[in-house]
């Protein structure tokens, strides 16, 4: 993997984090959360539209769900562009998932809720429909099972199966999905407790029977995607040396092999990835956030949004 360039997409001296990127109607869009802190009631989702080179970005929308609005994920469909995110209410501690929608990427309908006590964390448009792995909360506020859901239109969802059972010892939550060239669906599942090592799962259609195995690394804020038959993983990688960075790894048999450690550190991760051209190719854009520049100057832990231009092997 070759890194060509790092561009700073957005930096206003606040905590900017949790990225997503998608092509829609010939333009790249980036979404992220902007707030004063990692968790703060003023959190808003910012949507930017870029030029074809990914160097210049202009405001395209702001999404607010009434309280701290978090973890935006862009879902581009043939009909329009969704921004899925959730609001976090602290009194009581509740979450509500929902979306804002635009038919043209310019005019946005207000955020509307889909389900309470469940985080629709990273919906993907796969094989002509939407799929998402949603993690929930049980009555005691512990995170519940990870449930695979399916939607024909990106609005109305049906449960397919429990992808990972609730486990208070490991606390599975954020889950990324991807399809390989044979139609097998893959899932990368963050686990908050215990070893912190994620699960990598796979299922054949109709995706209601999953086989999951623990990976031998600690990785948070997971993402995965396929290029040319290769499965790439990314997230906040806790290296054996003790360093913590946003990194890209490639699965080689059962082992994830590091390919690229991006300029990053401190509070960092939550990658998005798209081809650098909407028609595809081996040149890719990777978005992520990081606080390394602020930490290097002894500042408070703020963070900026970055775009890495890379060629995948």
Image (cartoon, helix red, strand yellow):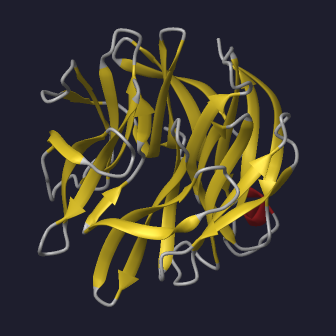
User: Which quarter of the rendering shows the C terminus?
Assistant: top right
Identify the residue shown where x is 31% and y is 24%: 185
Q: Nearer the viewer, residue 84 or 196?
A: 84
Q: Position of residue 86 (x, y in %)?
A: 42, 66
Picture mark count: 0
Is 175 on the left-hand or right-hand side of 19?
Answer: left
Residue drawn at (59%, 73%) of the image: 44
Q: For the N terminus, which image quadrant? A: top right
Estimate the x, y position of residue 262 in percent, counting from the top left. Answer: 69, 38
Q: Quadrant of residue 287 in the image?
A: top right
Q: Position of residue 170 (x, y in %)?
A: 21, 52
**For residue 306, above or below residue 59:** above
Image-based side of 80 in relation to 137, left or right: right
Query: Could one spot residue 114 in this view of the protein?
Result: yes
Q: Residue at x 52, y 84 (%)?
A: 41
Q: Is residue 284 left or right of residue 218?
A: right
Image coordinates of residue 11 in percent, x first then y, are 79, 63
Q: Pick whichever, 81 or 126, lies toward us.
A: 81
Residue at point 62% right, 40% down? 22
Q: Is residue 266 visible?
A: no
Furthest residue toward bottom: 91
Along the line of sight, the residue nearer the viewer: 27 or 165: 27
């Amino acid at each position: 993997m070759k890194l060509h360039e790092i561009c700073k997409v957005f930096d206003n001296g606040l905590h900017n984090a949790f990225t997503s990127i998608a092509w829609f109607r010939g333009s790249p869009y980036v979404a992220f959360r902007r707030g004063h802190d990692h968790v703060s009631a003023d959190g808003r989702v910012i949507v930017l539209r870029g030029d074809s080179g990914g160097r210049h970005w202009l405001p395209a929308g702001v999404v607010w769900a009434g309280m701290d609005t978090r973890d935006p994920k862009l879902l581009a469909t043939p009909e329009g562009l969704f921004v899925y995110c959730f609001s976090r209410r602290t009194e009581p501690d509740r979450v509500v998932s929902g979306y804002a929608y635009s038919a043209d990427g310019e005019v946005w309908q207000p955020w509307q809720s889909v389900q309470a006590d469940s985080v629709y964390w990273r919906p993907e448009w796969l094989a002509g429909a939407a799929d998402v792995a949603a993690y929930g909360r049980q009555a005691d506020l512990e995170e519940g099972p990870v449930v695979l859901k399916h939607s024909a239109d990106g609005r109305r969802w049906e449960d397919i199966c429990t992808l990972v059972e609730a486990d208070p010892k490991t606390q599975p939550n954020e889950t990324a999905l991807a399809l390989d060239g044979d139609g097998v669906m893959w899932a990368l599942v963050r686990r908050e407790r215990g070893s912190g090592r994620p699960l990598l799962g796979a299922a054949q259609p109709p995706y209601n029977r999953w086989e999951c195995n623990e990976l031998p690394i600690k990785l948070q804020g997971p993402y995965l995607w396929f290029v040319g038959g290769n499965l790439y993983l990314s997230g906040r990688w806790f290296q054996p040396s003790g360093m913590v960075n946003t990194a890209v790894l490639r699965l080689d048999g059962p082992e994830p092999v590091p390919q690229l450690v991006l300029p990053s550190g401190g509070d960092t991760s939550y990658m998005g990835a798209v081809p650098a051209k909407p028609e595809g190719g081996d040149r890719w854009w990777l978005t992520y956030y990081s606080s390394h520049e602020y930490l290097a100057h002894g500042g408070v832990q703020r963070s900026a949004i970055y775009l890495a231009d890379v060629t995948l092997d």
